[in-house]
Amino acid sequence: MGLAILAATLCCSVAIAGFMRSFALRRNLVDLPNARSSHVSPTPRGGGVSIVSAFLSATLILFAIHLLDMKTTFAMVVGGGAIAVVGFLDDRRHLPARLRFLVHVAAAMLVVAVLGGISEHSLSAWGIKQSWIGFVLSLLVLVWATNLFNFMDGIDGIAGSESVFIGLAGAWLNWMQGGDPGLTAAMLCLSTASCGFLVWNWPPARIFMGDVGSGFLGFMLATLALAASRQGRIPFEVWPILGGVFVVDSSVTLIRRLIRGDRWYEPHRIHAYQHLARRLRGHKYVTLIAIAIDAFWLMPWACLADAFPRSAGACVLASLSPLVLMALWAGAGKPER
């Protein structure tokens, strides 16, 4: 049954992405190259609909066969659906940033209200005893993760690959720790849906994910991370390690732009991965570098943090510190010459 659901999710994602590409070409829904983009030819957008459709369908099936509980299903379907809808509308009509932000906050509040915040057990490891801080931090994490994937979805294949990695790694760790099998299945389905989209988005991309996909992926990965850590199976610190490539690049870039006085919400192409794509004259090599860092550097640290929860905080610092230096070397947040 599980393999059938994964196979159906993959096929559904591939098929819908292909349909969306044809639809976008007929309706002239394409991203045109400009001074702030990293592509050089007009490319259809909105392919993230395939990830949303395939994953939410799989989620409902998991609920129907009693693998996912009502609360988790409700949080993912309603919260994730809201993020996807506002992203889709933004892809079509360019909604005001304030409206998008309000929807992101509302969806995050829904998830925290239904699932709860970061557990007191996770907070106690950092010397925090007030449970309300866990709720506030959860809101910030959910909103930040939603925009994080949006910021980092700037070259072919990178956001989809990151989702595949985090989904697979999270599912593996949750399974090894004897976590909820429904969450393990959901993580695998999100990874599989992303893999189906990559068939069309791998460099050179034939369709872009768009805000409908990038925001949804960030929000959904954070929701699954919160649900898994609430069980006490996986230390919450494991998740920023798994997402270290995106966390570090976006954070360093944002901090340097704020220090310089830039408007943080304005589009740009000065993330480390975008600088590297221009240096290497292509997207594929940068995406492969990110995959290599995920697999050979971050995954071992995540396993170590999972095996020794009391040292999880130290693992976060040890794993991400070299990435900060790499991001600075690559030019994260540095204006183009």
Image: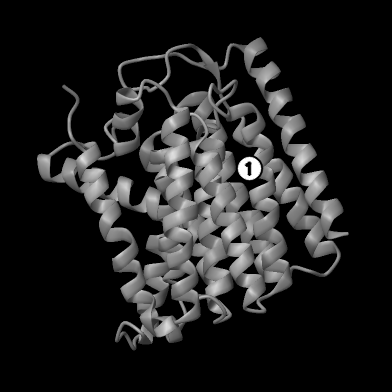
- SS under mark 1: helix
Residue 53's x, y, as percent?
A: 71, 42
Nearer to us in this view, 169 or 211 = 169
Asked which colour scheme the image uses, the reply is one colour
Residue 33's x, y, as percent?
A: 41, 14
Residue under the point 82% across and 45% down? 8
Residue under the point 36% across and 27% down? 277
Count of all numbered marks drawn on residues in the image: 1
Query: Is residue 71 positioned above or below 151 on the image?
Result: below
On the question of residue 267 being in view, the answer is no
**Where is residue 201, by image quadrant?**
top right
Nearer to us in this view, 18 or 157 = 157
The residue lying furthest to the front in this view is: 296
Nearer to us in this view, 47 or 179 = 179
Residue under the point 77% across and 45% down? 9
Judged left or right of residue 59, residue 118 is left
On the question of residue 249 being in view, the answer is yes
Query: Is residue 214 positioned above or below 62 on the image?
Result: above
Judged left or right of residue 204, residue 66 is right
Residue under the point 47% across and 11% down? 41
Residue 308's x, y, as percent?
A: 45, 82
Residue 144's x, y, as percent?
A: 39, 54
Quarter containing the N terminus: bottom right
Q: Name the residue under label 1.
A: 194
* Crowd rating for badge 1 (residues with CA inside 10 Å; few <14, some 14–19, many 20+): many
Residue type highlighted by circle 1: Ser
Nearer to us in this view, 130 or 47 = 47
Quarter containing the C terminus: top left
Query: Is residue 26 positioned above or below 164 on the image?
Result: above
